[in-house]
Amino acid sequence: MTDYENEIVRPDARLIILKALAAQTNESLHSGFLGEELRRLGIDRPRAWVHGELDWLAEIGAVTLIKADSVVVATLTEKGHRHLRRAIVIEGVKRPSRPGE
């Protein structure tokens, strides 16, 4: 993997995923919708790549996962919320902009 992939693309994708989850009433989405959101914002990766990022976010406690066949449902955790509110920094996830920036 390139430095660009690990230092730019993955942290940005992880932030996009957390924001997409936070935008939902139940703070949950399945991996297909998350993949579409990433593609909409210029990160076109296969489902397996999205699942890998979700696994990583679950390992560090930013999301919980429910796996059913080829679909993964992610739900935002309090730790993920705290990162989005800028109350903590999760290394490996792009830091969100300050409100109004």
Image: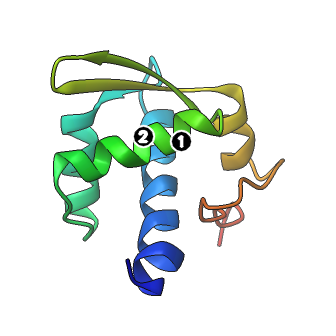
Q: Quadrant of residue 9?
A: bottom left
Q: Nearer the viewer, residue 50 or 26?
A: 50
* Farthest front residue in view: 1
In what element is the residue under mark 2?
helix
Which amino acid does the dot numbered 1 rest on? Leu
Check disc 1 and report the residue beneath it.
57
The residue depicted at 72 percent of the width and 64 percent of the height is 98
- The image position of residue 50, as x and y in percent, is 30, 48
Q: Residues within 10 Å of mark 1 (few under 14, many from 20)?
A: many
- Name the side, left or right, on which 86 lies relative to 29: right
Check disc 2 and report the residue beneath it.
54
Q: Nearer the viewer, residue 101 or 72?
A: 72
Q: Residues within 10 Å of mark 2 (few under 14, many from 20)?
A: many
Q: Are marks 2 and 1 in contact (CB under 8 Å)?
A: yes
The residue depicted at 41 percent of the width and 48 percent of the height is 53
Q: Nearer the viewer, residue 88 or 10?
A: 10
Q: For the C terminus, give its image quadrant.
A: bottom right
Which amino acid does the dot numbered 2 rest on? Leu
Q: For the N terminus, give its image quadrant.
A: bottom left
